[in-house]
Image: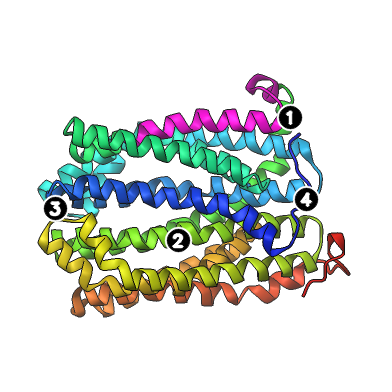
Protein backbone atom coordinates (compact mmCIF):
# COMPACT_ATOMS: atom_id res chain seq x y z
CA UNK A 1 0.00 0.00 0.00
CA UNK A 2 1.46 3.34 -1.04
CA UNK A 3 -0.28 5.84 1.15
CA UNK A 4 -0.71 6.10 4.89
CA UNK A 5 -3.39 7.75 7.08
CA UNK A 6 -3.42 11.48 7.69
CA UNK A 7 -0.55 12.43 9.97
CA UNK A 8 -1.83 13.27 13.51
CA UNK A 9 -1.21 16.80 14.75
CA UNK A 10 0.23 16.43 18.24
CA UNK A 11 3.67 17.28 19.61
CA UNK A 12 4.38 13.59 20.15
CA UNK A 13 3.46 12.81 16.54
CA UNK A 14 5.65 15.69 15.29
CA UNK A 15 8.63 14.33 17.23
CA UNK A 16 7.90 10.78 16.09
CA UNK A 17 8.00 11.90 12.48
CA UNK A 18 10.90 14.34 12.90
CA UNK A 19 13.46 12.28 14.81
CA UNK A 20 14.27 9.85 11.98
CA UNK A 21 14.75 12.81 9.65
CA UNK A 22 16.89 14.52 12.26
CA UNK A 23 19.16 11.50 12.67
CA UNK A 24 19.41 11.01 8.91
CA UNK A 25 19.97 14.70 8.27
CA UNK A 26 22.59 14.95 11.03
CA UNK A 27 24.53 12.17 9.32
CA UNK A 28 24.84 14.25 6.13
CA UNK A 29 27.03 17.02 7.58
CA UNK A 30 28.67 14.40 9.77
CA UNK A 31 30.11 12.90 6.59
CA UNK A 32 31.29 16.39 5.60
CA UNK A 33 32.92 16.72 9.01
CA UNK A 34 34.55 13.31 8.63
CA UNK A 35 35.82 14.33 5.19
CA UNK A 36 37.20 17.54 6.69
CA UNK A 37 38.93 15.58 9.47
CA UNK A 38 40.28 12.98 7.02
CA UNK A 39 41.88 15.68 4.88
CA UNK A 40 42.42 18.29 7.61
CA UNK A 41 44.48 16.01 9.83
CA UNK A 42 46.91 15.30 7.00
CA UNK A 43 48.09 18.87 7.58
CA UNK A 44 47.68 19.69 3.87
CA UNK A 45 45.83 23.03 3.76
CA UNK A 46 45.81 22.99 -0.06
CA UNK A 47 44.03 19.62 -0.15
CA UNK A 48 41.46 20.81 2.40
CA UNK A 49 40.93 24.04 0.43
CA UNK A 50 40.60 21.94 -2.76
CA UNK A 51 37.85 19.85 -1.20
CA UNK A 52 36.17 23.07 -0.01
CA UNK A 53 36.30 24.59 -3.49
CA UNK A 54 35.31 21.39 -5.26
CA UNK A 55 32.45 20.68 -2.87
CA UNK A 56 31.11 24.20 -3.39
CA UNK A 57 31.11 23.72 -7.16
CA UNK A 58 29.51 20.26 -7.01
CA UNK A 59 26.87 21.52 -4.60
CA UNK A 60 26.08 24.36 -6.99
CA UNK A 61 25.76 22.01 -9.96
CA UNK A 62 23.94 19.12 -8.28
CA UNK A 63 21.59 21.16 -6.09
CA UNK A 64 20.55 23.21 -9.10
CA UNK A 65 18.34 20.16 -9.58
CA UNK A 66 17.36 19.94 -5.92
CA UNK A 67 13.78 20.54 -7.06
CA UNK A 68 13.64 16.76 -7.54
CA UNK A 69 13.65 16.47 -3.74
CA UNK A 70 11.63 19.56 -2.88
CA UNK A 71 9.08 19.43 -5.70
CA UNK A 72 8.29 15.74 -5.20
CA UNK A 73 7.73 16.17 -1.46
CA UNK A 74 4.96 18.71 -1.89
CA UNK A 75 3.35 17.02 -4.90
CA UNK A 76 3.46 13.58 -3.30
CA UNK A 77 1.96 14.90 -0.06
CA UNK A 78 -0.84 16.60 -2.00
CA UNK A 79 -1.55 13.45 -4.04
CA UNK A 80 -1.65 11.42 -0.84
CA UNK A 81 -3.92 13.96 0.85
CA UNK A 82 -6.37 13.74 -2.05
CA UNK A 83 -6.21 9.91 -2.10
CA UNK A 84 -4.69 9.58 -5.59
CA UNK A 85 -2.49 6.46 -5.24
CA UNK A 86 -1.92 6.21 -8.99
CA UNK A 87 -0.37 9.67 -9.11
CA UNK A 88 1.75 8.91 -6.03
CA UNK A 89 3.32 5.95 -7.88
CA UNK A 90 3.68 7.95 -11.10
CA UNK A 91 5.52 10.73 -9.26
CA UNK A 92 8.11 8.23 -8.02
CA UNK A 93 8.77 6.80 -11.48
CA UNK A 94 8.86 10.27 -13.08
CA UNK A 95 11.25 11.57 -10.47
CA UNK A 96 13.74 8.70 -10.71
CA UNK A 97 13.66 8.80 -14.53
CA UNK A 98 14.24 12.56 -14.67
CA UNK A 99 17.03 12.33 -12.08
CA UNK A 100 18.92 9.61 -13.97
CA UNK A 101 18.57 11.46 -17.29
CA UNK A 102 19.77 14.82 -15.97
CA UNK A 103 22.60 13.14 -14.06
CA UNK A 104 23.81 11.36 -17.18
CA UNK A 105 23.84 14.68 -19.06
CA UNK A 106 25.93 16.25 -16.28
CA UNK A 107 28.42 13.37 -16.41
CA UNK A 108 28.86 13.89 -20.15
CA UNK A 109 29.33 17.65 -19.65
CA UNK A 110 31.70 17.41 -16.69
CA UNK A 111 34.83 18.72 -18.45
CA UNK A 112 33.40 22.06 -19.68
CA UNK A 113 31.42 22.54 -16.45
CA UNK A 114 34.40 21.97 -14.15
CA UNK A 115 36.75 24.02 -16.34
CA UNK A 116 34.38 26.99 -16.33
CA UNK A 117 33.70 26.77 -12.60
CA UNK A 118 37.38 26.58 -11.65
CA UNK A 119 38.20 29.49 -13.96
CA UNK A 120 35.59 31.65 -12.21
CA UNK A 121 36.54 30.55 -8.68
CA UNK A 122 40.30 30.95 -8.82
CA UNK A 123 41.97 29.30 -5.86
CA UNK A 124 45.58 28.99 -7.00
CA UNK A 125 47.21 26.25 -9.09
CA UNK A 126 47.64 23.67 -6.31
CA UNK A 127 44.20 24.20 -4.80
CA UNK A 128 42.54 24.11 -8.24
CA UNK A 129 44.34 20.85 -9.03
CA UNK A 130 42.97 19.20 -5.89
CA UNK A 131 39.50 20.62 -6.58
CA UNK A 132 39.56 19.30 -10.16
CA UNK A 133 40.39 15.77 -8.94
CA UNK A 134 37.46 15.93 -6.50
CA UNK A 135 35.02 17.30 -9.09
CA UNK A 136 35.96 14.75 -11.76
CA UNK A 137 35.27 11.86 -9.39
CA UNK A 138 31.99 13.33 -8.11
CA UNK A 139 30.49 13.74 -11.58
CA UNK A 140 30.46 9.97 -12.06
CA UNK A 141 27.92 9.79 -9.24
CA UNK A 142 25.65 12.48 -10.71
CA UNK A 143 22.87 10.17 -12.06
CA UNK A 144 22.65 8.33 -8.74
CA UNK A 145 22.78 11.54 -6.67
CA UNK A 146 19.86 13.11 -8.55
CA UNK A 147 17.80 9.91 -8.48
CA UNK A 148 18.33 9.79 -4.69
CA UNK A 149 16.99 13.37 -4.49
CA UNK A 150 13.75 12.16 -6.11
CA UNK A 151 13.45 9.05 -3.94
CA UNK A 152 14.02 11.06 -0.76
CA UNK A 153 11.41 13.66 -1.76
CA UNK A 154 8.87 10.92 -2.46
CA UNK A 155 9.49 9.21 0.89
CA UNK A 156 9.21 12.48 2.81
CA UNK A 157 6.02 13.41 0.98
CA UNK A 158 4.46 10.17 2.24
CA UNK A 159 5.70 10.82 5.76
CA UNK A 160 7.90 7.70 5.50
CA UNK A 161 10.67 9.28 7.50
CA UNK A 162 12.10 6.02 8.85
CA UNK A 163 12.62 4.72 5.33
CA UNK A 164 14.27 8.03 4.44
CA UNK A 165 16.49 7.58 7.51
CA UNK A 166 17.58 4.12 6.37
CA UNK A 167 18.44 5.46 2.92
CA UNK A 168 20.42 8.37 4.34
CA UNK A 169 22.32 6.25 6.83
CA UNK A 170 23.28 3.66 4.23
CA UNK A 171 24.59 6.34 1.88
CA UNK A 172 26.45 8.27 4.56
CA UNK A 173 27.99 5.22 6.23
CA UNK A 174 29.28 3.99 2.87
CA UNK A 175 30.48 7.50 2.06
CA UNK A 176 32.48 7.84 5.28
CA UNK A 177 33.98 4.35 5.03
CA UNK A 178 34.99 4.73 1.37
CA UNK A 179 36.49 8.18 1.96
CA UNK A 180 38.63 7.01 4.88
CA UNK A 181 39.82 4.00 2.85
CA UNK A 182 40.62 6.02 -0.27
CA UNK A 183 42.38 8.93 1.49
CA UNK A 184 44.15 7.40 4.50
CA UNK A 185 44.43 3.93 2.95
CA UNK A 186 45.14 4.63 -0.73
CA UNK A 187 46.49 8.19 -0.36
CA UNK A 188 44.25 9.62 -3.08
CA UNK A 189 43.68 13.02 -1.42
CA UNK A 190 40.80 15.19 -2.59
CA UNK A 191 40.14 12.84 -5.52
CA UNK A 192 39.62 9.99 -3.06
CA UNK A 193 36.97 12.01 -1.20
CA UNK A 194 35.12 12.56 -4.48
CA UNK A 195 35.37 8.92 -5.57
CA UNK A 196 34.15 7.66 -2.20
CA UNK A 197 31.13 9.95 -2.28
CA UNK A 198 30.23 8.95 -5.85
CA UNK A 199 30.43 5.26 -4.95
CA UNK A 200 28.17 5.79 -1.95
CA UNK A 201 25.59 7.55 -4.14
CA UNK A 202 25.33 4.53 -6.43
CA UNK A 203 24.89 2.19 -3.47
CA UNK A 204 22.18 4.52 -2.16
CA UNK A 205 20.12 4.63 -5.35
CA UNK A 206 19.69 0.85 -5.39
CA UNK A 207 18.91 0.88 -1.67
CA UNK A 208 16.29 3.59 -2.26
CA UNK A 209 14.59 1.70 -5.07
CA UNK A 210 14.38 -1.37 -2.85
CA UNK A 211 12.79 0.69 -0.05
CA UNK A 212 10.22 2.22 -2.42
CA UNK A 213 9.30 -1.18 -3.82
CA UNK A 214 8.73 -2.46 -0.29
CA UNK A 215 6.39 0.47 0.46
CA UNK A 216 4.38 0.07 -2.74
CA UNK A 217 4.36 -3.73 -2.49
CA UNK A 218 5.51 -3.87 -6.11
CA UNK A 219 8.79 -4.88 -7.74
CA UNK A 220 10.50 -2.44 -10.13
CA UNK A 221 9.01 -4.11 -13.21
CA UNK A 222 5.54 -4.36 -11.68
CA UNK A 223 5.71 -0.71 -10.62
CA UNK A 224 6.49 0.31 -14.19
CA UNK A 225 3.65 -1.87 -15.51
CA UNK A 226 1.19 -0.36 -12.99
CA UNK A 227 2.14 3.11 -14.20
CA UNK A 228 0.93 3.29 -17.83
CA UNK A 229 2.90 5.45 -20.24
CA UNK A 230 -0.05 7.79 -20.78
CA UNK A 231 -0.22 8.40 -17.00
CA UNK A 232 3.55 8.76 -16.69
CA UNK A 233 3.65 11.30 -19.53
CA UNK A 234 0.37 13.02 -18.65
CA UNK A 235 0.76 16.54 -20.00
CA UNK A 236 -1.03 18.27 -17.13
CA UNK A 237 0.95 16.41 -14.46
CA UNK A 238 4.25 17.06 -16.23
CA UNK A 239 3.39 20.74 -16.71
CA UNK A 240 2.62 21.06 -13.00
CA UNK A 241 5.84 19.26 -12.06
CA UNK A 242 8.03 21.37 -14.33
CA UNK A 243 6.29 24.63 -13.42
CA UNK A 244 7.03 24.04 -9.73
CA UNK A 245 10.49 22.71 -10.52
CA UNK A 246 11.38 25.71 -12.69
CA UNK A 247 10.75 28.08 -9.81
CA UNK A 248 12.51 25.81 -7.31
CA UNK A 249 15.49 25.50 -9.65
CA UNK A 250 15.83 29.28 -9.88
CA UNK A 251 15.42 29.51 -6.10
CA UNK A 252 18.07 26.87 -5.50
CA UNK A 253 20.54 28.42 -7.93
CA UNK A 254 20.08 31.82 -6.27
CA UNK A 255 20.75 30.45 -2.79
CA UNK A 256 23.67 28.30 -3.95
CA UNK A 257 25.22 31.43 -5.44
CA UNK A 258 25.40 32.76 -1.90
CA UNK A 259 27.61 29.83 -0.83
CA UNK A 260 29.62 30.00 -4.06
CA UNK A 261 30.19 33.73 -3.54
CA UNK A 262 31.20 33.04 0.07
CA UNK A 263 33.82 30.49 -1.01
CA UNK A 264 35.09 32.75 -3.77
CA UNK A 265 35.41 35.68 -1.35
CA UNK A 266 37.40 33.53 1.06
CA UNK A 267 39.64 32.24 -1.75
CA UNK A 268 40.55 35.83 -2.68
CA UNK A 269 41.89 36.43 0.83
CA UNK A 270 43.97 33.25 0.93
CA UNK A 271 44.13 29.47 1.29
CA UNK A 272 43.87 29.52 5.10
CA UNK A 273 40.76 31.73 5.00
CA UNK A 274 39.10 29.52 2.37
CA UNK A 275 39.88 26.40 4.40
CA UNK A 276 38.77 27.99 7.71
CA UNK A 277 35.48 29.19 6.24
CA UNK A 278 34.88 25.64 4.95
CA UNK A 279 35.41 24.33 8.48
CA UNK A 280 32.92 26.85 9.90
CA UNK A 281 30.39 25.94 7.20
CA UNK A 282 30.33 22.45 8.71
CA UNK A 283 28.75 24.03 11.81
CA UNK A 284 26.21 25.78 9.58
CA UNK A 285 25.52 22.54 7.70
CA UNK A 286 24.87 20.61 10.90
CA UNK A 287 22.40 23.29 11.99
CA UNK A 288 20.60 23.40 8.65
CA UNK A 289 20.36 19.65 8.25
CA UNK A 290 19.27 18.95 11.83
CA UNK A 291 16.66 21.72 11.98
CA UNK A 292 15.45 20.79 8.50
CA UNK A 293 13.94 17.74 10.22
CA UNK A 294 11.14 20.02 11.38
CA UNK A 295 10.97 21.83 8.04
CA UNK A 296 10.60 18.49 6.23
CA UNK A 297 7.94 17.43 8.73
CA UNK A 298 6.13 20.69 7.98
CA UNK A 299 6.38 20.02 4.22
CA UNK A 300 4.46 16.75 4.44
CA UNK A 301 1.87 18.09 6.87
CA UNK A 302 1.35 21.38 5.05
CA UNK A 303 0.98 19.52 1.75
CA UNK A 304 -1.60 17.17 3.24
CA UNK A 305 -3.50 20.06 4.85
CA UNK A 306 -3.71 21.97 1.57
CA UNK A 307 -4.59 18.80 -0.35
CA UNK A 308 -7.45 18.24 2.10
CA UNK A 309 -8.46 21.92 2.01
CA UNK A 310 -8.00 22.47 5.77
CA UNK A 311 -6.74 25.83 7.02
CA UNK A 312 -6.95 24.58 10.60
CA UNK A 313 -4.60 21.66 9.93
CA UNK A 314 -2.25 24.04 8.12
CA UNK A 315 -2.04 26.49 11.03
CA UNK A 316 -1.51 23.81 13.64
CA UNK A 317 1.14 22.08 11.52
CA UNK A 318 3.07 25.34 11.17
CA UNK A 319 2.81 26.21 14.85
CA UNK A 320 3.91 22.85 16.25
CA UNK A 321 6.82 22.31 13.89
CA UNK A 322 8.06 25.90 14.31
CA UNK A 323 8.09 25.62 18.11
CA UNK A 324 10.53 22.73 17.92
CA UNK A 325 12.68 24.38 15.25
CA UNK A 326 13.17 27.65 17.17
CA UNK A 327 13.98 25.81 20.41
CA UNK A 328 16.42 23.56 18.55
CA UNK A 329 18.13 26.55 16.94
CA UNK A 330 18.67 28.18 20.33
CA UNK A 331 20.16 24.99 21.80
CA UNK A 332 22.57 24.56 18.88
CA UNK A 333 23.74 28.18 19.15
CA UNK A 334 24.51 27.70 22.84
CA UNK A 335 26.33 24.43 22.11
CA UNK A 336 28.50 26.01 19.42
CA UNK A 337 29.30 28.98 21.63
CA UNK A 338 30.46 26.74 24.49
CA UNK A 339 32.12 23.85 22.60
CA UNK A 340 32.96 25.23 19.16
CA UNK A 341 36.66 25.82 19.73
CA UNK A 342 37.17 22.24 20.94
CA UNK A 343 35.42 20.94 17.82
CA UNK A 344 37.62 23.10 15.56
CA UNK A 345 40.74 21.79 17.33
CA UNK A 346 39.66 18.22 16.55
CA UNK A 347 38.93 19.00 12.90
CA UNK A 348 42.04 20.97 11.88
CA UNK A 349 45.74 20.77 12.77
CA UNK A 350 47.05 23.50 10.44
CA UNK A 351 47.72 26.44 12.79
CA UNK A 352 46.73 29.28 10.47
CA UNK A 353 43.48 27.59 9.42
CA UNK A 354 42.65 26.72 13.03
CA UNK A 355 43.27 30.27 14.30
CA UNK A 356 41.13 31.81 11.56
CA UNK A 357 38.27 29.39 12.19
CA UNK A 358 38.28 30.11 15.94
CA UNK A 359 38.28 33.88 15.32
CA UNK A 360 35.12 33.75 13.21
CA UNK A 361 33.37 30.98 15.15
CA UNK A 362 30.89 33.41 16.84
CA UNK A 363 29.29 34.09 13.45
CA UNK A 364 28.71 30.37 12.87
CA UNK A 365 27.31 30.07 16.41
CA UNK A 366 24.65 32.72 15.70
CA UNK A 367 23.33 31.12 12.54
CA UNK A 368 21.27 28.24 14.07
CA UNK A 369 19.09 30.72 15.97
CA UNK A 370 18.89 33.28 13.15
CA UNK A 371 18.40 30.65 10.46
CA UNK A 372 15.61 28.59 12.04
CA UNK A 373 12.75 30.89 10.87
CA UNK A 374 14.05 30.95 7.28
CA UNK A 375 14.44 27.15 7.16
CA UNK A 376 10.92 26.66 8.53
CA UNK A 377 9.43 29.09 6.01
CA UNK A 378 11.22 27.20 3.24
CA UNK A 379 9.55 23.99 4.41
CA UNK A 380 6.12 25.60 4.62
CA UNK A 381 6.27 27.03 1.11
CA UNK A 382 7.78 23.85 -0.36
CA UNK A 383 4.96 21.81 1.17
CA UNK A 384 2.47 24.29 -0.26
CA UNK A 385 4.22 24.00 -3.67
CA UNK A 386 4.50 27.81 -3.78
CA UNK A 387 7.57 27.87 -5.99
CA UNK A 388 7.12 31.46 -7.17
CA UNK A 389 7.32 32.83 -3.62
CA UNK A 390 10.44 30.78 -2.90
CA UNK A 391 11.99 31.93 -6.18
CA UNK A 392 11.31 35.62 -5.61
CA UNK A 393 12.49 35.57 -1.99
CA UNK A 394 15.72 33.80 -2.95
CA UNK A 395 16.49 36.25 -5.76
CA UNK A 396 15.96 39.26 -3.50
CA UNK A 397 18.07 37.70 -0.76
CA UNK A 398 20.95 36.81 -3.08
CA UNK A 399 21.10 40.24 -4.72
CA UNK A 400 21.01 41.95 -1.32
CA UNK A 401 23.74 39.62 -0.03
CA UNK A 402 26.09 40.29 -2.94
CA UNK A 403 25.60 44.05 -2.56
CA UNK A 404 26.27 43.81 1.19
CA UNK A 405 29.35 41.63 0.69
CA UNK A 406 30.81 44.07 -1.82
CA UNK A 407 30.12 47.00 0.50
CA UNK A 408 31.83 45.22 3.40
CA UNK A 409 34.81 43.93 1.41
CA UNK A 410 37.25 46.40 3.06
CA UNK A 411 36.60 44.59 6.37
CA UNK A 412 38.01 41.30 5.07
CA UNK A 413 36.61 38.07 6.51
CA UNK A 414 34.58 40.04 9.09
CA UNK A 415 32.69 41.62 6.20
CA UNK A 416 32.27 38.24 4.49
CA UNK A 417 30.69 36.64 7.57
CA UNK A 418 28.54 39.67 8.40
CA UNK A 419 27.01 39.63 4.93
CA UNK A 420 26.56 35.84 4.98
CA UNK A 421 24.88 35.85 8.41
CA UNK A 422 22.49 38.58 7.25
CA UNK A 423 21.16 36.31 4.46
CA UNK A 424 19.17 34.27 6.98
CA UNK A 425 17.37 37.35 8.25
CA UNK A 426 16.74 38.48 4.67
CA UNK A 427 15.30 35.09 3.66
CA UNK A 428 12.89 35.00 6.58
CA UNK A 429 11.77 38.59 5.99
CA UNK A 430 11.11 38.17 2.26
CA UNK A 431 9.22 34.88 2.64
CA UNK A 432 7.14 36.26 5.49
CA UNK A 433 5.68 38.80 3.09
CA UNK A 434 3.99 35.93 1.20
CA UNK A 435 2.38 34.28 4.24
CA UNK A 436 -0.89 36.31 4.22
CA UNK A 437 -1.53 35.38 0.57
CA UNK A 438 -0.85 31.71 1.29
CA UNK A 439 -3.35 31.75 4.16
CA UNK A 440 -6.04 33.39 2.02
CA UNK A 441 -5.65 30.66 -0.62
CA UNK A 442 -6.48 27.79 1.77
CA UNK A 443 -10.10 26.80 2.20
CA UNK A 444 -11.13 27.18 5.87
CA UNK A 445 -12.17 24.10 7.80
CA UNK A 446 -14.25 24.02 10.95
CA UNK A 447 -12.31 21.30 12.79
CA UNK A 448 -9.24 19.16 12.43
CA UNK A 449 -9.41 15.46 11.68
CA UNK A 450 -9.92 13.66 14.98
CA UNK A 451 -11.62 16.66 16.55
CA UNK A 452 -8.51 18.57 17.64
CA UNK A 453 -8.75 22.33 17.81
CA UNK A 454 -6.43 24.47 15.72
CA UNK A 455 -5.17 26.36 18.78
Residue located beneath label 2 in the image: 288
Q: What's the CA distance linking mark 2 and mark 4? A: 27 Å
Contact (CB < 8 A) between labels 1 and 2?
A: no
Secondary structure type for disc 3: helix
Secondary structure type for disc 2: helix
Vertical placement of 40 versus 199: above or below? Answer: below
Secondary structure type for disc 1: helix
Q: Which mark is residue 81?
A: 4
Q: Which residues are magenta?
A: 196-224
Q: Which mark is residue 45?
A: 3
Dot 1: within a 10 Å radius of its alpha carbon, few (fewer than 14), some, or many (20 or more) residues?
A: few
Secondary structure type for disc 4: helix
Mark 3 vs 2, N-terminal side: 3
Q: Is residue 190 magenta?
A: no
Q: What's the CA distance linking mark 3 and mark 2? A: 26 Å
Mark 1 vs 2, N-terminal side: 1
Mark 3 vs 1, N-terminal side: 3
Q: How many marks?
A: 4
Residue at image x 70%, y 21%? 222
Residue 14: % across, % down: 66, 59
Vertical placement of 1 versus 446: above or below? Answer: above
Q: Quadrant of residue 223?
A: top right
- Answer whether residue 111 is visible to the viewer in this image: no
Residue located beneath label 1 in the image: 230
Residue 331: % across, % down: 46, 71
Q: What's the CA distance linking mark 4 and mark 3? A: 51 Å
Residue 133: % across, % down: 22, 38
Amino acid sequence: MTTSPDLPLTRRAILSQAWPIMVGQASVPLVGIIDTIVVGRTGDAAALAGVALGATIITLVFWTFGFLRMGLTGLTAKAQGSGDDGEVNALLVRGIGIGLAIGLALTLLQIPLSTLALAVMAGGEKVSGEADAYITARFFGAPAALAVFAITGWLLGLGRTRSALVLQLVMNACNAALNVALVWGAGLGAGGIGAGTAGAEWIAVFTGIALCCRITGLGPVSLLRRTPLDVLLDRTALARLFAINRDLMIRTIALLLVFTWLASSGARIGTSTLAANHVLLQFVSVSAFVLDAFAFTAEARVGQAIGAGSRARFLRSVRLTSEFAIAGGALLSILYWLCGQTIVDVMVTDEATNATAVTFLPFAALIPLLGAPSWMLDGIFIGATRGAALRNAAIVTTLAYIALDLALRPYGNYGIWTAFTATYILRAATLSAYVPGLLRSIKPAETLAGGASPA
